[in-house]
Amino acid sequence: MTPRENGYARAQDGTALAYQRHGDGPPLLLLAGQANDHHWWDGVREDFHATHATITMDYRGTGDSDAPDTHYSTRGFADDAIAVLDRLGVERADVYGTSMGGRVAQWIAARHPERVRRLVLGCTSPGGRHARERDQRVRRALGHRDPEVARETLLDLMYTPSWRAGHRGPFTVVGSAKMPPHARRRHLVASDEHDAWDVLEEITAPTLILHGDADEMVPSDNAGLLASRIPDARVELLPGARHAYFQEFRPLASRLVVTFLREG
């Protein structure tokens, strides 16, 4: 049976942060998307247990972590992730972040280079004025007043119609069920305010950038923008994949990540 440890770390401001460590081996920190908790990685993290122990966390405002009604930021989430690594006694880890988790991972790698061995950024963006933003049509649909319409829009952005036809859920990428409304708003602001453009050149870890070429949530042009700023970065585009490429295209995506991590 895969060893498991669940516990809590304390952020600098005292916020309790739930974490989950599964498996043995070198540590791999997995960072979820906006407004999601560790369940984002359900059914995927097992792909890495042959080589790594996986570490996940519930962002503040999600899952079993505290949800203070204060300002949230991707840089603050990065500090929270460092607090989790400190609690676990992890001095250096591989880091794999997807969507907003990729934004958080950028700050970890730029501000704490000694803590990151190898970096994987999935379906993410540098943020700020240099980023390629999603179409306004997509933004309007995600903000629809009818929550069911908004949810269907989100699922269509995550998965192709053919995949959805054979998968009826439950879906683990549509938000943490325990989130209070104020935390959802603060996660949205944190992701929207992200801008790591000026620090990307400070990343020293070898970096793999993964992106679906049919991603309308975070357009795939952002992969090239990140690679243009991060030294020693390379890009792998997954043909036909949408935002949740790591689930729908799991065999290919996980194989690319495992191969990259083994290169170090």
Image (spheres, rainbow, N blue to C red):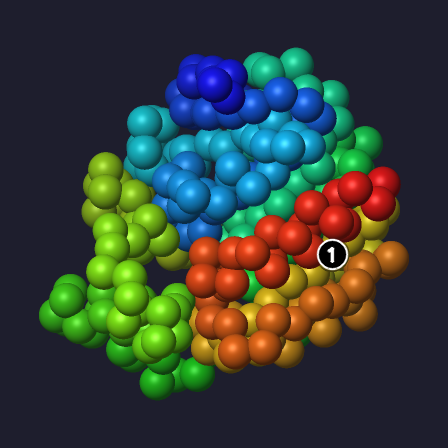
Q: Is residue 225 above or below residue 62?
A: below
Q: Is residue 198 something that shows in the picture?
A: yes
Q: Using the image as rendered, state which of residue 76 and residue 117 is in the foreground.
A: 117
Q: Residue visible at 24% across and 51% down?
A: 170
Left or right: where does residue 187 sit relative to residue 130? left
Q: Determine which residue is flagged by label 1.
A: 208
Quarter of the picture holding the C terminus: top right
Q: Is residue 27 above or below residue 125?
A: above
Q: Using the image as rendered, state which of residue 135 and residue 208 is in the foreground.
A: 208
Q: Quadrant of residue 159?
A: bottom left
Q: Quadrant of residue 48?
A: top right
Q: Residue visible at 68% across and 23% down?
A: 25
Left or right: where does residue 222 sit relative to residue 145? right
Q: Residue visible at 69% across and 56% down?
A: 256
Query: Which percent across, then down, holds residue 211?
Result: 60, 67
Q: Residues within 10 Å of mark 1 (few under 14, many from 20)?
A: many
Q: Name the kind of residue labelled 1 in the image.
A: Leu
Q: Is residue 119 something that shows in the picture?
A: no
Query: Which percent across, then down, holds residue 258?
Result: 69, 46
Query: Which percent across, then down, holds residue 223?
Result: 67, 69
